[in-house]
């Protein structure tokens, strides 16, 4: 296997101080500092070189030095060939997760209006967070989350960002494979009309999760560039659109008179059993109960995609900060609409009886409903195709932490993917109660990646000459970091309360 050739370098001329790191001239909206703060310009004679090589500079090299001829190493030689549309698909797929299945339950515990307000606030905050990341990246010419941490706080910053990305995405991948493990056998059972799970291998979730990992996830994870997954990302999003259309259709085909509300359960009854206009079938605009506070972290993390933003930015064709912000805004807007519609029509179908997992509620009405079975297959396909997207930032984080001086090398690229998938499969198969630990990881790493790190990196990286600490942008960034700490405390508190209440129930025999 041959390694990629290092990028060629040239001396930085005074006239090049306003060139942005990807070799293009300075465009309106791009943040570039004075020559003392600017990275060296790259190969202005080669306008096609759009990937920033400084994202992968060894730690031993000075990121901002342009006075010496140095060999710049990087992990790939990919030159920004991913189209705008494919980038939107990839980022949208990174945002979209299994959490959409629980949004109807979240709306039931907040009410329609309060849910819409919270979802809007979270979408705006997520877009602002990506703005902070892109602006920091544009100033120092670094398109790797871990290297932004290194630029802001040195090695501790890089390690903190790399560990947070690794833990968060391993937790996300594991949660997707848990869905495959527990839902896939039920889907096969329903299609075969088998009442009891037999001993056949194709009804064993452990075998199925290994089969899916080897046959589908591994080949996609071995691809060299994230941009190639745009096609599978588009198909994955199509599956979720099918899910959304089915939820809307079911609202008009499942009458509220067929739903009995009894201790939060749903059972099918005769049409005459309940008045369709009864009070249980009236949506609540605002609702506050013991579960309302638990839905806030769910919504806060509904737009988690930040570890994937900079890799997608690196591979975007003719990349600029403004163009990548458009990619992010369009992806967030699409997911915002899908989230709200799925939550609204799921809630208006079952109202207060909706379960935490929406598809389970449909199955209680008719466990052999053909449309719902197809929807479950679509959701399984979507979460399976999301795993390779989430794996890419983890592999990059591991490379940044363990192999900062190395260029792209196929054996290492393949080995990291194999080790990660093997480890995640072992977790899913042998640790059935590991979801509690993933909850703690998500409650700590997700606020760091979404709120805290982008804000404090921005405060540290943006020069004081350009924006003093008392300037409005940096004050807003500091407040943004404070919101992250607040969400972290809230999420951990809810998890501890859950654990305590479950322990008490177990000890009292309930």
Image (spheres, rainbow, N blue to C red):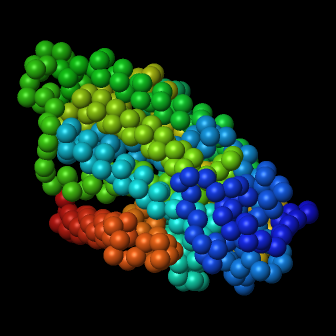
Residue 40 location, x and y as percent?
Answer: 72, 71
Residue 263 vs 496, above or below: the answer is above
Given residues 436 and 98, the one toward you in this image is 98
Say if residue 1 shows up in the picture. Answer: yes
**Horizontal side, residue 468 vs residue 164: left or right:** left
Residue 171 location, x and y as percent?
Answer: 50, 61
Quarter of the image where one finds residue 445:
bottom left
Residue located at (31% from left, 57% from top): 297
Quarter of the image where one finds residue 51:
bottom right
Given residues 220 and 129, the one toward you in this image is 129
Q: Report the label total.
A: 0
The N terminus: image quadrant: bottom right
Residue furthest toward the front?
A: 15
Residue furthest toward the top?
A: 272
Residue 213 location, x and y as percent?
Answer: 65, 49
Residue 385 vs 437, above or below: the answer is above
Residue 254 vs 137, above or below: the answer is above
**Horizontal side, residue 353 vs residue 128: left or right:** left
Given residues 55 and 178, the one toward you in this image is 55
Residue located at (68% from left, 51% from top): 315
Say if residue 390 shows up in the picture. Answer: no
Residue furthest toward the left?
A: 279
């Amino acid at each position: 296997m041959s390694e990629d050739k290092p990028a060629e370098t040239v001396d930085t001329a005074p006239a090049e101080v306003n060139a942005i790191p990807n070799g293009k001239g300075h465009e309106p909206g791009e943040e570039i500092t004075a020559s003392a703060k600017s990275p060296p310009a790259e190969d202005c004679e080669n306008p096609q070189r759009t990937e920033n090589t400084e994202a992968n500079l060894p730690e031993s090299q000075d990121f901002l030095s342009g006075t010496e001829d140095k060999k710049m190493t990087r992990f790939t030689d990919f030159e920004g060939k991913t189209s705008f549309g494919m980038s939107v698909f990839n980022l949208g797929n990174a945002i979209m997760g299994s959490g959409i299945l629980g949004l109807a339950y979240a709306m039931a515990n907040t009410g329609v209006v309060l849910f819409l307000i919270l979802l809007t606030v979270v979408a705006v905050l997520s877009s602002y967070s990506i703005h902070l990341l892109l602006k920091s990246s544009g100033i120092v010419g670094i398109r790797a989350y871990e290297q932004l941490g290194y630029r802001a706080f040195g090695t501790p910053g890089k390690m903190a960002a790399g560990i947070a990305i690794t833990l968060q995405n391993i937790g996300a991948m594991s949660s997707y494979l848990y869905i495959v493990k527990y839902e896939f056998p039920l889907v096969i059972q329903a299609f075969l009309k088998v009442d009891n799970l037999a001993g056949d291998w194709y009804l064993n979730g452990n075998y199925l999760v290994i089969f899916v990992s080897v046959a589908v996830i591994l080949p996609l994870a071995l691809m060299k560039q994230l941009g190639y997954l745009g096609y599978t990302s588009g198909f994955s999003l199509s599956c979720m659109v099918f899910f959304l259309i089915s939820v809307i259709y079911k609202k008009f085909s499942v009458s509220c008179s067929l739903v009995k509300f009894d201790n939060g359960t749903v059972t099918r009854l005769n049409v005459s059993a309940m008045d369709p206009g009864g009070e249980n079938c009236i949506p609540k605009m605002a609702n506050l109960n013991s579960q309302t506070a638990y839905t806030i972290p769910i919504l806060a993390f509904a737009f988690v995609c930040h570890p994937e933003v900079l890799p997608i930015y690196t591979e975007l064709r003719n990349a600029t900060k403004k163009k990548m912000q458009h990619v992010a805004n369009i992806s967030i807007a699409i997911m915002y609409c899908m989230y709200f519609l799925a939550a609204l029509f799921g809630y208006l179908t079952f109202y207060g009886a909706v379960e935490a997992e929406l598809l389970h509620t449909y199955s209680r009405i008719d466990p052999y409903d053909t449309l719902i079975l197809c929807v479950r297959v679509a959701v399984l396909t979507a979460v399976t195709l999301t795993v390779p997207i989430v794996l890419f930032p983890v592999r990059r984080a591991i490379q940044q932490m363990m192999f900062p001086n190395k260029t792209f090398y196929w054996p290492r690229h393949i080995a990291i993917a194999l080790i990660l998938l093997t480890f995640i499969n072992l977790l899913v198969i042998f640790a059935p109660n590991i979801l509690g630990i993933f909850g703690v990881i998500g409650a700590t790493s997700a606020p760091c990646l979404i709120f805290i790190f982008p804000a404090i990196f921005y405060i540290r990286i943006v020069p004081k000459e350009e924006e003093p600490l008392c300037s409005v942008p940096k004050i807003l960034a500091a407040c943004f970091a404070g919101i992250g700490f607040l969400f972290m405390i809230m999420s951990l508190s809810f998890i501890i309360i859950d654990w305590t209440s479950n322990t008490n129930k177990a000890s009292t025999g309930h």
